[in-house]
Image: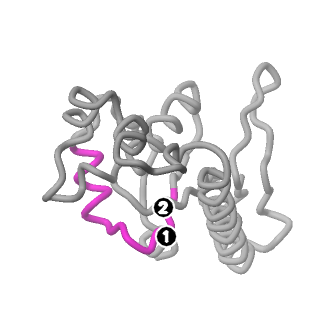
Amino acid sequence: EVDGISYLPSARQIQRAFGGLVELRKLIGYEDNNFSTGRHRSKIGLKSNARGKNGEETLREILQSKFHEIFVHIEKPLFKSKKLRVDFYVYSPSGNFCVDVFTTNTFHDLSTNLNIKLKKYSDFKEKLYFVLISDNLLREDLELLIQRKKIKLSNKMSVVIINDFVN
């Protein structure tokens, strides 16, 4: 967040000069100086979980209206050897596919989440859509991220915004 504000020094510079944001907040006199723990982190987690749940519910309704409930499996386990589940496994006449939904609102979090998902699904062999539901990110953001990625998506993987996925 600090790096996104033009008039502030970079997070790296704050780390070098003060030992990080927590130490800087202590130096300035903040009583509550660590925003990554306690009630601050809890508040972020609650918002994130609600956003994720709403996103999955939205996509479930879309998939079930198109393919019918019986053909849309929720959190289907895919391997016996490891706990890997996709959000949705869809049985389709034109070919089965999987969907992993994520809701993120910053470019940095988008990159982090996608890296986690690529590692998680590295051995995956079926068609897989990573569907982004976001109020702040656009198709152009996804395209830029994919262009910059060092870890490339397999030819069976696609990252799309929800509108493109539905279309």
Q: Residue furthest top?
A: 81
Question: Is residue 37 rendered to the left or right of residue 84?
Answer: left
Query: Disc 1 vs disc 2: Cβ atoms closer than 8 Å?
Result: yes
Measuring from the top left, give residue 2's x and y in whole percent: 29, 51
Within 10 Å of disc 1 (Cα), the crowding (few <14, some 14-19, many 20+) is many
Q: Determine if the magenta segment contains residue 33.
A: no
Q: Which residue is mark 2?
A: 132
Q: Nearer the viewer, residue 66 or 33?
A: 33
Q: Which residue is mark 1?
A: 162
Q: Secondary structure at mark 2?
A: strand
Measuring from the top left, give residue 50's x and y in whole percent: 69, 66
Residue located at (77% from left, 29% from top): 83
Please state the extent of the stretch shown in magenta in the rendering. 131-147
Residue 166's place in the image compared with 7, above or below, is below
Q: Quadrant of residue 62?
A: bottom right
Residue located at (51% from left, 67% from top): 133
The three-letter amino acid code for the residue at tag 2 is: Leu
Residue 122's place in the image compared with 41, above or below, is above
Q: Residue furthest front?
A: 29
Q: Nearer the viewer, residue 117 or 70?
A: 117
